[in-house]
Amino acid sequence: MKLTGVELRHVRMPLVAPFRTSFGTSTSRDVLLLRAVTAEAEGWGECVAMADPLYSSEYIGAATDVLTRFLVPALGAVEHLDANAVGPALSGYKGHRMAKAALELAILDAELRAAGRPLARELGAVRDRVPCGVSVGIMGSIGELLDAVAGYVAAGYVRIKLKIEPGWDVEPVRAVRERFGDGLLLQVDANTAYALADARHLSRLDPFDLLLIEQPLDEDDLLGHAALARLIRTPICLDESITSARTAVAAITLGACEIVNIKAGRVGGYLEARRIHDACMAHGVPVWCGGMLETGIGRAANVALAALPGFTLPGDTSASDRFYRTDLTAPFVLADGHLAVPTGPGLGVEPLPDVSPRSPPKLPGYRS
Ligand SMILES: CSCC[C@@H](NC(=O)CCC(=O)O)C(=O)O
Ligand SMILES: [Mg+2]
């Protein structure tokens, strides 16, 4: 394939309710969509970077700039382009994994649509539907939290994840465990809000039989997580720290985590995500698919990824209506606690007509 045009489309999606984490509260999600044009087919990608560099160092303005000035021109110079060529063609540019992931997904989508191959099969999916967990934000009160969790349990979600931070951790977890019983699959996500000195406090979560505690310490603190793992019983799962298969193996080898949250956007794309999956399986480490409030475009790719054999824990692959009143694609709807894996070529979903552009972008450059 030859890349003949790329369109960047910045969309603001209102959230159905504020979503509060240890690094702030969002009421809308800015999304950077990317459409790749080739002679054979078009492909879509979604950049999971937020509007501000709060989850990680990436943010939409930087992704837009690095795609426009460096990454898209670099791919435009590749004569025989396919998804496997994207990583090597962009390797000279450091970082910007979320921007690279969006571009690689669009090329992968175009390649697979042209070949009539579904993404799930390409990645090695072994399931046609995936069990879904849901991420629950920090709330204003325990009562509000219990109402929210009750709604998600009633909707059929098979696992509940609670965002925590200092001052909102042991009591919310205790309340949810007491209200919904020991059978509820329950985990927490700190988004780096704690320090190793909080170990004794975090060990107060041990009695609640959590599946895991996600990213309690700083992204770069593998040794701190390894020390914390020796001080608490709850298994540690890493998210922000895992930026590649190499860092996943380093974290596992150092004893920094027993479980890995795989987010293709965070690690540079779905091909690296599969490499992390394979490496974790080789080490006997279970993985699950994390979420970045993706629209149906990224959600379709995440559901395909979550269908791989090593994804043995429910992911943050919730239905479209968890965050959005209307999605950019046909909505993903929870059925018996599961989402069906798309079966069409490539992503298997299309942006709804009012999202997909009416006219192709000016060739050969880009339009942001
Ligand atoms: C956009 S910042 C959200 C990052 C957070 N993601 C979630 O909590 C899941 C959100 C979702 O269901 O997409 C995480 O650290 O795991
Ligand atoms: Mg997380």
Image: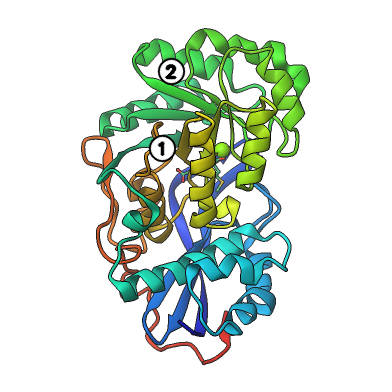
- Residue found at the far front of this picture: 282
The image quadrant where one finds ligand 2 is top right
Q: Residues within 10 Å of mark 1 (few under 14, many from 20)?
A: many
**Which residue is more in the foreground, 33 or 250?**
250
Mark 1 close to ligand 1, CB under 8 Å: no
Q: Residue drawn 67% across and 27% down?
A: 256
Q: Residue tagged by mark 1?
A: 311
Q: Mark yes or no: residue 137 visible.
A: no
Residue 105 in the image, given as x and y percentages of width and height? 47, 64
Residue 176 in the image, given as x and y percentages of width and height? 43, 17
For mark 2, give the secondary structure. helix
Quadrant of the frame with the N terminus: bottom left
Q: Residue tagged by mark 2?
A: 176
Q: Is residue 310 above or below residue 38?
A: above
Residue type at mark 1: give it.
Phe
Instruction: Report whether 279 appears left or right of 298.
Output: right
Q: Residue drawn 75% across and 26% down?
A: 224
Q: Residue drawn 46% across and 69% down?
A: 106
Disc nearest the viewer among 1 and 2: 1
Mark 2 close to ligand 1, CB under 8 Å: no
Residue 329 in the image, given as x and y percentages of width and height? 32, 63
- Residue found at the far top of this picture: 207
**Residue 22 got which mark?**
none
Residue type at mark 2: give it.
Val
